[in-house]
Image: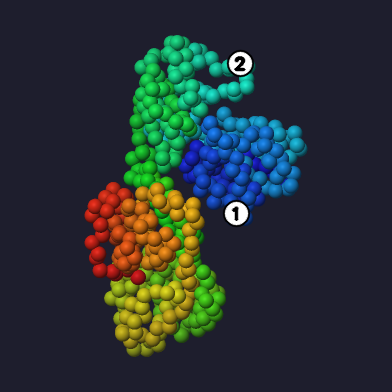
């Protein structure tokens, strides 16, 4: 098998290359750095072994020789190994040493370049490392050479005369000495300079100064240091995102968390996925659903109220011909989209994404209709819809399509929630199971709910809701989260009567 030396990029998981993601998906073993984005590990199969060999400045570290031996050991065992390294494996990293160790052992390896922080961190801080009419050269240099070397290979005085932009990696500890040598070489003390810590991550922080003053600020690694006229630029885009620096908890089931998490990350948030529910098969294994689908031609309508219900219903159809002559109703655009993915067009989508709005759109059975509605849904749900349809004269068959079961967060997850800024709830059951596992007091200061039913349940359980999404969609929930973080509990939800399904 092959050992893959994969550059993870500087921190933003979206900067991982397509090739890197492909390899992680097939890995048996992932040997990863401290600087790798934790969410990238989720791209590996659940059964893959994950080995943390990250080095900690002035703290415990795994010796490089042990890392090399580990890669050789797993490679010889015939496993697919991904060595996930922060940034690029060959840019001031020790990928070359690891590649040499593998070559000496006769083990195949492949290098997958990554985006280096020397380019990405300044870009995320609004600093272009070159500009067309100035700063037409770029020098990337390490500020931390191998301490066992008997010489220094960096002639800082000579670099000062080159001009252009200098990007220093791993230079915080030696920044004062570096600055003094650059100034001694002729670089102006007033040259703009900036240090970007944790570039591309939600906790990114930029300190600006000059070549003579930057080292006097409180700086910490890992920081990318930019020296040159470009460091005065502030073409900001990343730091202006509304949730930058905020941690938001997503409580959706693991299989569904990705869409909401992605939208929150796009708004700048650090996302902490802590599912409080899991979606499971119906108690009878789907026997009742299969029977209903076998006789679906006897119904006038199939009403689907959730994405889970739509996906599981469609998965048991042979194809769309089973629904010939049967009309489809859906609550919410997400449910309609799940049907569209199966090439099924809804006949009725209420204006508001709630059960009550669907009832307002329904008419009593017309002459010639069978008067039957099939309602595949969760094992536990409100009875507003079946009771309302029955009052209109429809015979409603409710079929259990899935179950929402509790998922108990780990101690580490609960500890992480304690430091979060906000939490999102997309269903009453997610609130219920969160409170059961952690208690109402564990909720972060800002609480955003997808709709009034979810919010009402939260309030009943002692969780103060800050904002409710309107309309009840994921996009609106992200907007509600932004408002909730900005306002905290200063103007909490006003208890609008519940109207969502």
Q: Is residue 182 visible?
A: no
Residue 468: percent from the left, percent from the top?
30, 60
Sequence-wise, the earlier of marks 2 and 1 is 1
Frontmost residue, 327 versus 137: 137
Q: Is residue 282 above or below residue 139?
A: below
Frontmost residue, 74 versus 343: 74
Residue 351: percent from the left, percent from the top?
30, 68
Quarter of the image for the C terminus: give it. bottom left
Which label belongs to residue 12? none
**Is 344 left or right of 23, judged from the image as shown?**
left
Q: Quadrant of residue 448?
A: bottom left
Q: Is residue 26 above or below residue 99?
A: below
Q: Quadrant of residue 75?
A: top right
The residue at the point 36 percent across, 17 percent down is: 190
**Is 495 left or right of 379, judged from the image as shown?**
left
Q: Is residue 251 above or below residue 74?
A: below
Residue 16: percent from the left, percent from the top?
53, 43
Q: Tell me the element at label 2.
A: loop
The residue at the point 75 percent across, 37 percent down is: 105
Q: Tell me the element at label 1.
A: loop
Location of mark 2 (residue): 151
From the image, state whether disc 2 or disc 1 is nearer to you.
Answer: 2
Distance from Cα at disc 2 to Cα at disc 1: 45 Å
Which label belongs to residue 45? 1
Residue 362: percent from the left, percent from the top?
31, 78
Crowdedness near tag 1: few (<14), some (14–19) or many (≥20) residues, C-alpha within 10 Å: some
User: Circles 2 and 1: CB distance less than 8 Å?
Assistant: no
The residue at the point 41 percent across, 62 percent down is: 434
């Amino acid at each position: 098998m092959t050992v893959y030396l994969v550059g993870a990029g500087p921190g933003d998981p979206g900067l991982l290359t397509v090739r890197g993601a492909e390899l992680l998906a097939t890995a048996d073993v992932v040997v990863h750095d401290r600087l790798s984005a934790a969410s990238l590990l989720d791209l590996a199969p659940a059964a893959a072994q994950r080995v943390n060999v990250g080095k900690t400045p002035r703290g415990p570290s795994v010796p490089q020789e042990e890392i090399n031996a580990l890669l050789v050991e797993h490679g010889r065992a015939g496993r697919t190994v991904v060595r996930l390294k922060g940034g690029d494996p060959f840019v001031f990293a020790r990928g070359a040493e690891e590649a040499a160790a593998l070559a000496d052992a006769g083990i195949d390896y492949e290098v997958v370049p990554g985006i280096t922080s020397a380019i990405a961190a300044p870009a995320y801080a609004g600093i272009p490392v070159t500009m067309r009419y100035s700063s037409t050269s770029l020098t990337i240099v390490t500020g931390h050479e191998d301490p066992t070397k008997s010489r220094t290979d960096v002639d800082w005085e000579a670099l000062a005369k080159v001009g252009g932009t200098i990007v220093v990696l791993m230079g915080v500890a030696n920044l004062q000495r570096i600055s003094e040598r650059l100034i001694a070489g002729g670089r102006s003390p007033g040259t703009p300079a900036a240090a970007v810590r944790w570039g591309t991550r939600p906790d990114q922080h930029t300190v600006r100064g000059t070549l003579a003053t930057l080292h006097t600020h409180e700086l910490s690694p890992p920081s990318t240091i930019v020296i040159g006229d470009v460091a005065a630029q502030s073409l900001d885009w990343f730091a202006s995102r509304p949730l930058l620096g905020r941690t938001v908890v997503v409580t959706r089931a693991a299989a569904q968390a990705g869409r909401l998490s992605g939208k929150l990350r796009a708004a700048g948030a650090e996302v902490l996925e802590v599912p409080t529910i899991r979606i499971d098969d119906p108690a009878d294994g789907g026997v009742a659903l299969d029977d209903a689908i076998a006789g679906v031609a006897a119904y006038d309508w199939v009403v689907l109220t959730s994405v889970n219900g739509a996906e599981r219903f469609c998965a048991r159809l042979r194809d769309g011909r089973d629904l010939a002559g049967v009309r489809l109703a859906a609550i919410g655009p997400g449910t309609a989209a799940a049907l569209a993915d199966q090439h099924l067009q809804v006949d009725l989508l209420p204006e508001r994404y709630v059960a009550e709005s669907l009832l307002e759109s329904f008419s009593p059975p017309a002459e010639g209709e069978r008067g039957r509605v099939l309602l595949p849904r969760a094992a536990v749900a409100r009875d507003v819809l079946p009771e309302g349809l029955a009052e209109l004269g429809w015979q409603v068959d409710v079929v259990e399509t899935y179950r929402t079961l509790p998922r108990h967060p780990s101690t580490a997850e609960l500890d992480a929630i304690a430091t979060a800024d906000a939490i999102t709830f997309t269903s009453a059951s997610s609130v219920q199971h969160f409170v059961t596992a952690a208690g109402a007091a564990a909720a972060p200061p800002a609480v955003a709910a997808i709709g009034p039913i979810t919010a009402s349940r939260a309030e009943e359980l002692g969780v103060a809701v800050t904002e409710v999404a309107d309309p009840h969609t994921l996009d609106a929930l992200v907007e509600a989260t932004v408002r909730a973080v900005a306002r905290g509990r200063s103007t909490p939800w006003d208890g609008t009567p519940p109207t969502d399904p």
